[in-house]
Image: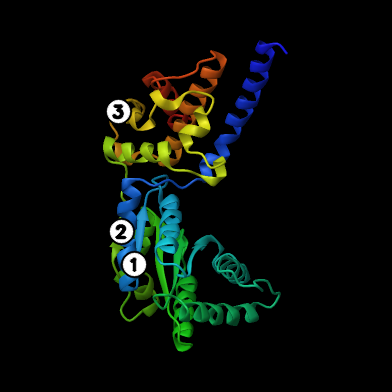
Amino acid sequence: MDKSASFDSDATELQKELLLLGPIFEKLVFTSDPLRKTYEQLRLVVYLKVPGCWLAAARGRGKTIAIEYCARRLRAEIPGLPVFIINEQILPGNELRSFFIRALAESGHDKPVSRDTTALRHRLPMYWAELSRYSPIGCVVVLLDECQSMRDLDMFLMKDLSNEIARMGGSLMTIAFGESPSFEALISQKTALMNDNGAVDRLFGGRQLKLFGYESESDWVSLFSEMDSMIFEELGNRSIAQAYFSHMDMSALRLANEAVRFCKALRMAQGRTPLIEANLRRVFVGIRHAMVTTALKSIDKRLTSITEIPIETWKEGLDFAMNSK
C-alpha cells in the first residue's frame, strides 16, 4: 500500500476526531486555582451548615462551571452526601409540576413522574428527608442556579420544603446562585423588606460567597497545567493535550508554558478590560479554536512535533471568539 495514501487516510481520521472535540470539550469540568478557591469557601459553609448563602456573578464568568465543579468535589470529598443542582428556570414560575419532576429525577428517585402535582408535592420532601437522614452530615445540599429569576412563590416553596423536611427528621441546605447585577438587585430589595420573612432569610440571609476569577497568568497556568495532565474518560482516557496532539511527539510541548503567550493575546483581544472580566464562555471557544487550528495545520504539514502555539494563533482564536457578533 502507498505510504502517502496511508498517511492521508490516517490524517483524515485525525481531522474528523479533532472536529468532534469541540462539543466534548465544552462539557468537561477542569480544575484550576480560581475553582479551588471558590470551592474552599463553599465547602466550609456546607460543613458549618450556614443557611442563606448565595453567590452572584456576571454572565460568562464561569458560574455554571463553578457549580458543576463544586458539586463534584463535594460528592467526592464527602461520599454519600446528597448534592443536587436545580435550575431556577424550572421552578414554579414556569410550572410547579416540572420543578417536582426535575428535582426528584436529579436526586435519583425511582418514581419522579406523576400526573398528580399534589402527589409529587408530598413525594419530594419525604424523599429528601429520607436522603438527609442517611447523609454523612445530616442534610441534603441543593445548589440552586439562575436565582435572579426567583419570585415570592419560589422562595416560599423552598421555605416550605425545608420546614417539611425538618419535621420529618431531615435537613435541607440550599446555596443560591444568580446572575449579576439582577441577582444582587433582587436580594437587596428582598432583604430590605425582609423583617420576619423566613423565606428570604433562608435563601439570602447568610453569607455572600465569591466566585474567584482568572486574575493573572498564574491562574491560567493552573488551568493549562490541568489540560496537560488531567485524564478524562470522555476523551478516551486522555488529557486535553493528548486528545488534540496525539498524532505528535508531545515531549516538546506543554500547554502550561503557553500561559504567557495566551495572556498576551487575551489582553490584546480585550483591549483595556482586565483579565478577570473576560467572558470565559467565549475565551474557551478561543482556546479550542487555537488548539484545533494548530492541530489541523500540523497534520496538513505532516509535523511530528511542535514546541509552542504561536501568539498569532492564540490571538486569531480569541479574536474569533470574543469579537464575534
> Image height check: is 226 above or below 241?
below
Determine crowd level at label 2: few under 14, some 14-19, many 20+ residues with C-alpha closer than 10 A.
Answer: few
Report, in whole angstroms, how far the alpha carbon at label 1 lies from the one at label 3.
36 Å
Left or right placement of residue 282 versus residue 45 in this view: right
Q: Secondary structure at mark 2?
A: helix
Q: Secondary structure at mark 3?
A: helix
Left or right placement of residue 205 versus residue 132 in this view: left
Going 45% across and 79% down the picture, which residue do you hit? 162
In the image, residue 224 lies at what x, y percent? Answer: 38, 36
Q: Secondary structure at mark 1?
A: loop
> Image height check: is 157 above or below 8?
below
Residue at image mark 1: 53
Determine crowd level at label 1: few under 14, some 14-19, many 20+ residues with C-alpha closer than 10 A.
Answer: many
The amino acid sitting under disc 2 is: Glu
> Image height check: is 32 above or below 300?
below
In the image, residue 288 lies at what x, y percent? Answer: 48, 32
Going 46% across and 55% down the picture, which residue do you hit? 68
User: Residue 77 or 52: which is nearer the viewer?
Assistant: 77
The amino acid sitting under disc 3 is: Val
User: Residue 149 or 254: which is nearer the viewer?
Assistant: 254
Q: Which mark is residue 171?
A: none
- As drawn, the residue found furthest toward the right would be 1
Mark 2 or 1, nearer chain start? 2
In the image, residue 217 lies at what x, y percent? Answer: 28, 35
Left or right placement of residue 118 versus residue 88 in this view: right
Residue at image mark 3: 260
Mark 2 or 3, nearer chain start? 2
Residue at image mark 2: 40
Image quadrant holding the N terminus, namely: top right
Rendering quarter of residue 104: bottom right
